[in-house]
Image: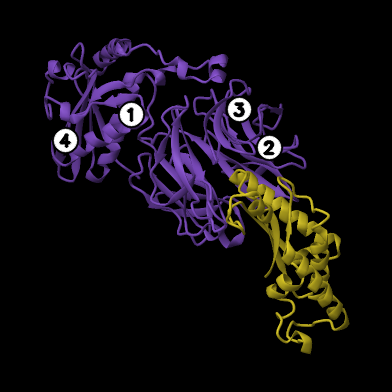
């Protein structure tokens, strides 16, 4: 959680920087970013924007506390117009495989729809669901499940 | 497995054998002590008096002697061992310890007194003859008390096929003595799982119901899930992530040739064949909603059966093809719904505690098996198609995905063990089987972790 907050703060700083010096191909780097990830890459997304949003149990609506991450992703995608992404929807282990495949897909679609509503071209966003079969956190407890109910944006 | 197998009824003639069968079945069953173990039933099951006769499994298992078959070895001994293991696993037979036998390999009419004295009620004898590359297997089932033959059959087949002969004999014994079809000449297709849990390799694998003749059907390049048998037992439908597009595929399990079911928009999942084998029912996700579709296998055209903003998955036909059960969150959380095969007449059937998922209709038509999910535990249970008579068969940390053996008496499912730390140590998933009475739960052995079992119908021919 702390990491997410930090990521969102640094994301705001980066977006401010980007607004002044829009990136063209991801190759140009300002002096201040020499050691950071290349803009427009997955590493950039993870470090400076936040690549994932989390969901409540058995729900696929975007939580108010998660919306800012998608807002930043939308802005980032507007900046890096050459980038195409795939959104991977996931579920925690406390469900059946088939239903969780559907739930993960609905979560991915929910995140995609949010980005489209923020002006991102839907043709740039694919979705896929892995259900409960690819947990991010391997524990069997509430903390792990909260981290596994997620939609992850991955640069193609 | 394209197998030529010839079958021949041995004397006494089929007609006589049938006559003796009805006679001796009465004798045998009458000899089994009447069920007095009703007190082991839980209160719920006792209160609801199931319509179907499930009390038989609570009788003592039938004592049966299966000495090595005479003639060519090692087949004679191996066939007897496979039959013994099958019948023991069913929980309905008690194969007598061979160390108690007074005769080793009876050839010809047994000396019944020597089988009576060790408590055998039924006796299986046989003889194997090698004929070039083929085996001829004679098998006889005897009613020990009156000393009469119940069945005599001979099979001729390729040598490599000896296990199927043993399974076919097991089914014949099961059917003659219990009055219902067996389930031993069947296979199980499932998902073999290996590697760390966040990067698991999931491959389809197939094996005989006793775990033998195991082989992989996919190489693990792409994950494959939820395999289901066609009624012909040679084809399966499943979901594959091939080229990162999760869609339903079909495969011939002998040639391992895969074909895409069709180019339908969106993710397609949870396929199952119709009982006539002419169509596949599945769930397709479009615009964030999962609805049920049926795809005609000849035209490959789809027809939508459910509509609306819900997640409708895991459809399963009734054995007469007239109804479909599936699970849907349309009422707020996952519950079971039954509708007509054309999508009409939809109604909810699950009303117990928790969420309900993965419904599957018994091949006998009398029950629907399901997974029930509560916050603390998952359970496998059965209910009648109208939702009444719910019984939980097994409960645990996580289990799901029941699949019926073709006689509707036994279920397979998968059971997960909880991870003990943040690295996932201790997690495992394995297959299990259980009688629909809730008794006789057993592990189904697999070389790796395993999930998503599907039990085939009896193999034809």
- Residue at position x 33%, y 29% in the image: B171
Foreground mark, 4 or 3, reads: 4
Give how far apart the Cα atoms at labels 2 and 4 are. 54 Å
* Left or right: B219 as drawn, with respect to B300: left
Secondary structure category for the residue under label 4:
strand
Disc 2 versus disc 4: nearer the observer: 2
Is residue A134 among the parts visible in the rendering?
A: yes
Alpha carbon of mark 3 to alpha carbon of mark 2: how far? 23 Å
Q: Quadrant of residue A127?
A: bottom right
Location of residue A145 with respect to B343 vertically, above or below? below
Mark 4 lies on residue:
B128
| Measured Cα–Cα span from mark 3 to mark 1 | 29 Å
Examine the rendered structure and indicate whether residue B54 appears above or below residue B248. Answer: above
Q: Residue at x 42, y 52 (%)?
A: B448
Q: Which chain is displayed in purple in the rendered image? A: B
Residue annotated with mark 3: B322
Query: Dividing the image into 4 quarters, which one contains the C terminus of chain A?
Result: bottom right
Question: Which of pointers 3 and 1 lies earlier in the amino acid sequence?
Answer: 1
Q: Is tag 1's residue or tag 4's residue first in the polypeptide sequence?
A: 4
Discs 3 and 2 lie in a common subunit: yes
The crowd level at tag 4 (other Cα within 10 Å; few <14, some 14-19, many 20+) is many
Judge left or right: residue B18 versus residue B305: left
Single out the residue that lies furthest toward the right: A20
Residue corresponding to mark 2: B334
Are there few (<14), some (14-19), or many (20+) residues within 10 Å of tag 3? few
């Amino acid at each position: 959680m702390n990491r997410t907050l930090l990521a969102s703060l640094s994301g705001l700083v980066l977006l401010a920087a980007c607004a002044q010096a829009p990136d063209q191909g991801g190759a140009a780097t300002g002096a201040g970013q020499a050691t950071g990830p290349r803009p427009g890459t997955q590493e950039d997304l993870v470090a400076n924007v936040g690549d994932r949003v989390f969901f409540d149990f058995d729900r696929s609506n975007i939580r108010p506390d998660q919306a800012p991450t998608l807002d930043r992703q939308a802005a980032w995608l507007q900046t890096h117009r050459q980038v195409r992404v795939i959104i991977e929807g996931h579920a925690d282990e406390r469900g059946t495989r088939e239903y969780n495949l559907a739930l993960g897909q609905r979560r991915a679609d929910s995140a995609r729809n949010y980005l489209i509503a923020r002006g991102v071209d839907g043709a740039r966003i694919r979705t896929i669901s892995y259900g409960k079969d690819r947990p991010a956190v391997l524990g069997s407890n509430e903390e792990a499940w909260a981290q596994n109910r997620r939609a992850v944006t991955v640069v193609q | 497995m394209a197998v030529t197998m010839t079958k021949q009824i041995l004397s006494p003639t089929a007609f006589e054998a049938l006559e003796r069968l009805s006679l001796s079945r009465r004798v045998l069953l009458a000899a089994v002590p009447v069920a007095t173990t009703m007190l082991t039933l839980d209160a719920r099951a006792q209160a609801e008096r199931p319509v179907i006769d499930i009390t038989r499994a609570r009788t003592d298992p039938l004592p049966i002697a299966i000495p090595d078959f005479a003639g060519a070895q090692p087949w004679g001994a191996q066939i007897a061992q496979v039959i013994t293991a099958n019948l023991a696993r069913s929980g309905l037979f008690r194969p007598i310890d061979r160390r108690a036998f007074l005769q080793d390999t009876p050839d010809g009419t047994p000396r019944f007194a020597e089988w009576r004295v060790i408590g055998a009620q039924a006796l299986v004898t046989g003889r194997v003859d090698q004929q070039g590359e083929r085996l001829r297997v004679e098998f006889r089932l005897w009613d020990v008390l009156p000393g009469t033959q119940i069945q005599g059959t001979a099979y001729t087949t390729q040598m490599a096929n000896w296990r199927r002969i043993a399974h076919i004999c097991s089914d014949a014994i099961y059917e003659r003595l219990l009055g219902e079809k067996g389930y031993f000449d069947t296979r199980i297709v499932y998902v073999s799982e290996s590697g760390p849990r966040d990067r698991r390799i999931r491959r389809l694998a197939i094996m005989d119901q006793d775990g033998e003749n195991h082989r992989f059907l996919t190489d693990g390049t792409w994950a494959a899930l939820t395999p289901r048998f066609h009624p012909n037992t040679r084809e399966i439908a499943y979901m594959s992530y091939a080229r990162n597009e999760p869609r339903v595929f079909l495969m011939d399990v002998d040639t391992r040739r895969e074909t895409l079911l069709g180019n339908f928009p969106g993710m397609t999942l949870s396929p199952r064949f119709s009982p006539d084998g002419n169509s596949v029912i599945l769930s397709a996700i479009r615009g964030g909603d999962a609805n049920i579709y049926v795809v005609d296998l000849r035209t490959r055209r789809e027809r939508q059966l459910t509509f609306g903003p819900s997640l409708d998955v895991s459809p399963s036909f009734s054995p007469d093809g007239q109804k479909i059960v599936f699970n849907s969150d349309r009422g707020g959380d996952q519950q079971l719904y039954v509708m007509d095969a054309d999508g009409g007449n939809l109604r909810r059937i699950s009303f117990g505690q928790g969420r309900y998922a993965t419904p599957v209709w018994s091949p006998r038509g009398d029950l629907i098996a399901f997974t029930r999910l509560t916050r603390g535990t998952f359970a496998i249970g059965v209910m009648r198609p109208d939702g009444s008579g719910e019984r939980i068969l097994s409960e645990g940390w996580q289990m799901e995905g029941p699949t019926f053996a073709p006689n509707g008496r036994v279920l397979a499912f998968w059971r997960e063990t909880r991870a003990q730390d943040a690295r996932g140590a201790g997690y495992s998933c394995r297959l299990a089987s259980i009688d629909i009475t809730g008794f006789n739960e057993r592990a189904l052995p697999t070389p790796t972790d395993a999930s998503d079992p599907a039990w085939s119908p009896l193999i034809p021919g």
